Amino acid sequence: VQLQASGGGTVQAGGSLRLTCAASGHSFRSYSVAWFRQAPGKERDFVASVARGNIYYADSVKGRFTISRDNAKNSLYLQMNSLKPEDTSVYYCAAQYGGADYRDYRQWGYWGQGTQVTVSS
């Protein structure tokens, strides 16, 4: 599966953005999918995932971000509300055939190219 993320940009604190990850290839519904983010000089951190029908969030985004997928459109989304300056990162979508509640980025085999999100204070 090939992934392409889009929707990043610059917003003020408290604002919202919606990220989209378009997938190509077949059997998209058979993949677990996730969003990660990486700030300069830091490791790639788990944000949210949909794995085997269950949804998981990092504590830092719970209640503010919503992950969803549309298998008919081969798409993954991340709705981000109440954005904070500390949410500033490059956001990556990821997929893994089958998959599970994997929080370590090294457990995900397919990646999009990343989209920059900048939140100004």
Image (cartoon, rainbow, N blue to C red):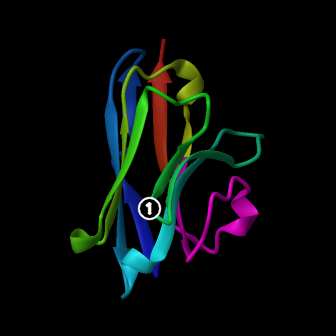
Residue found at the very far front of the displayed protein: 53
Residue plotted at (44% across, 61% down): 53
Q: Position of residue 91 (x, y in %)?
A: 52, 48
Residue plotted at (44% across, 71% down): 3
Q: Amino acid at mark 1?
A: Gly
Q: Is residue 59 above or below residue 3?
A: above
Residue 37 relative to residue 32: left or right: right
Q: Is residue 93 above or below residue 3?
A: above
Residue 45 relative to residue 84: left or right: right
Residue 114 relative to residue 11: left or right: right
Is 97 a magenta residue? yes
In magenta, the rendered stretch is 91-111
Residue found at the very far top of the displayed protein: 121
Q: Is residue 59 above or below residue 90?
A: above
Total labels drawn: 1
Task: Say which of 87 and 95 sits in front.
Answer: 95
Q: Position of residue 26 (x, y in %)?
A: 36, 88
Residue found at the very far left of the displayed protein: 72
Residue found at the very far bottom of the displayed protein: 26
Residue plotted at (42% across, 15% down): 13
Is 58 a magenta residue? no
Residue plotted at (51% across, 30% down): 62
Which residue, given by chain and number where applicable, does mark 1 sit on? 53
Q: Residues within 10 Å of mark 1 (few under 14, many from 20)?
A: few
Is residue 113 visible in this depiction of the protein? no
Residue 101 relative to residue 116: left or right: right
Is residue 105 visible in this depiction of the protein? yes
| Disc 1 element | loop
Q: Position of residue 42 (x, y in %)?
A: 76, 41
Q: Is residue 42 above or below residue 21?
A: above
Q: Position of residue 60 (x, y in %)?
A: 60, 28
Q: Quadrant of residue 88 in the image?
A: top right
